[in-house]
Image (cartoon, rainbow, N blue to C red):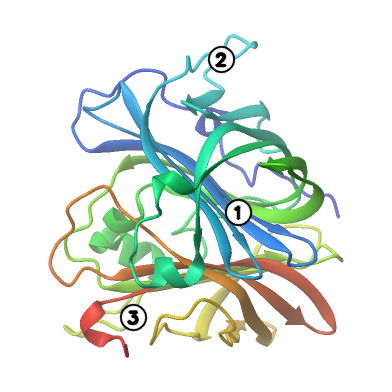
Amino acid sequence: MPVDLTGGLPVEREYVLAECPDQPDIRDAVNVWIEEENGRFGMRIGIEAASPDWDEHLIWLDIAFADGRVMSRRSDEPVHPAIGPEGLPTIRGAGPLRFRCVDPFKKWTASFKGPASETTAEALMRDRDPDASANKDVAFEIEMSMVVPPWAPGTMSSEARAALNGGDGDFVSPRYEQLFRAKGDMSIGDEHYSFAGQGLRIRRTGFRKFEGFWGHCWQSAVFPSGKAFGFNIFPPREDGVPNYAEGYVFAGDGALQPARPVDVPWMKSLTPGGDDVPLVLDTDSGPVRIEGTTFVNTRSRSHSVLPPDFPIVQQAHARYRWDGEEATGMIERSTKPSKLSR
C-alpha cells in the first residue's frame, strides 16, 4: 500500500510565516532531532520566531556524542529572508542556521556554519552554561527525506482531541511531526563526519504558553523495515481531569494507526545517559512493547524566565528494540524539580 507523506495535511502548513503576526505570543518554529544510525551521536537543531520580537530568531543546537561530549549553542540571531527560490516562504533561517523546505512533506535540508561551545552532558545536567572560551567551529549540511506520514496531535482519538481542546493544546501549540531518514556531512574543528541516520522533524505555528505545564514524556523512532512509533503523554492530573495521552504505530505502509501510551518511562532523576526507557502502547491489535536505552542525555536551556517549579526538560537520544529490530530515536521528558530525585 502506498504511503501518503502528506497525511492529508494541506501543503501550506509546510511553509513558514514570512511576516511577524499581529497577535502577541505567536511562535513559528522548525526543529529536528537526528540520531546517527549507530548511536555515535545525536543532534537537536531548531529555530523559533516569536512575535513581537521578529527581527531576531532564537536558534539552538546540541550535538551530543555517546561519550558525553556536547557541542552547544543558544543565541538570538538576525533572520534570513523567508522566501525561497520557488517564490514561496520555504526558508526559516537565522544567523549561522538555515532550514529549507525543498519538497513539502518529502524533503528538507538543514545547514549550519559558526561557533558552538564544547561542554559535557554531565555539566548540562548540573545546569552549567557552556564556557564561550571553549568554542569550536561547527559546520554541517544535512538532507532529510521523510518516510512516515506526519502526526498532528489530536487526530488519533477523541479523548486526545478533547484534552488538547481543554487547554493542554496551549502547551504544545498547533503542530505536527514527521519521521525521516538523514544523511549529512559535519565538521567540528578538524574532525569530519559523513553520516547516515534518522530523525524527527517538528513544524509548530501558533500560540504557546508555559504557565501551568507540569511535565511530559515524548518518544519516537523509525526502524530499518519502515516500522515506526511515536507518542506524547502528560502525567496524570491532580484535579482528576483526564491527562493528554496520544500516539501511533506505523507498519511501514498505509496510514498511521492510533495507539495510546499505557506504560512509559517517566523521568525521576537526571543522568547523562544510560537510562532504561521501555514503553508500552495499546493498539486495536494488542499491546506493542518496545525496549529502549538512552546513549546520551542533554538538558534544555531557556532564555526565558520560567515560572517557579517549572519542569526540567531532558532531551535525549536512545537505542530502541522492537520485535528483533533496532534503531536509534529520540526521547524528551520533563518533571517538576520538586518531584525529582537529585
Q: What residue occupies the far left of the structure in this picture?
A: 308
Q: Amino acid at mark 3?
A: Pro
**336 or 255, nearer to the observer:** 336
**Marked residue nearer the N-terminal end (2 or 3):** 2
Residue 34's x, y, as percent? 65, 54
State the SS at label 3. loop
Disc 2 and disc 3: Cα gap in Å? 40 Å
Placement of the N terminus among the 4 image quadrants: bottom right
Q: Amino acid at mark 2?
A: Leu
**338 or 18, nearer to the observer:** 338
Tell me the residue at 67%/55% (across/down): 199
Residue 204's x, y, as percent? 43, 43
172 over 317 or under it: above or below = above
Which numbered disc covers residue 275?
Answer: none
- Relative to residue 255, is residue 306 drawn left or right? left
Which numbered disc covers residue 88?
Answer: 2
Q: What residue occupies the far front of the structure in this picture?
A: 133
186 over 38 or under it: above or below = above
**Marked residue nearer the N-terminal end (1 or 2):** 1
Disc 1 and disc 3: Cα gap in Å? 26 Å
Q: Nearer the viewer, mark 1 or mark 2?
A: 1
State the SS at label 2. loop
Instruction: Please name the residue that numbered disc 3 is placed on.
Output: 235
Placement of the C terminus among the 4 image quadrants: bottom left
Callout 2: 10 Å neighbours few (<14), some, many (20+)? some
State the SS at label 1. strand
Instruction: Please name the residue that numbered disc 1 is placed on.
Output: 43
Residue 184 falls in which quadrant of the image?
A: top right
Residue 149's x, y, as percent? 67, 51
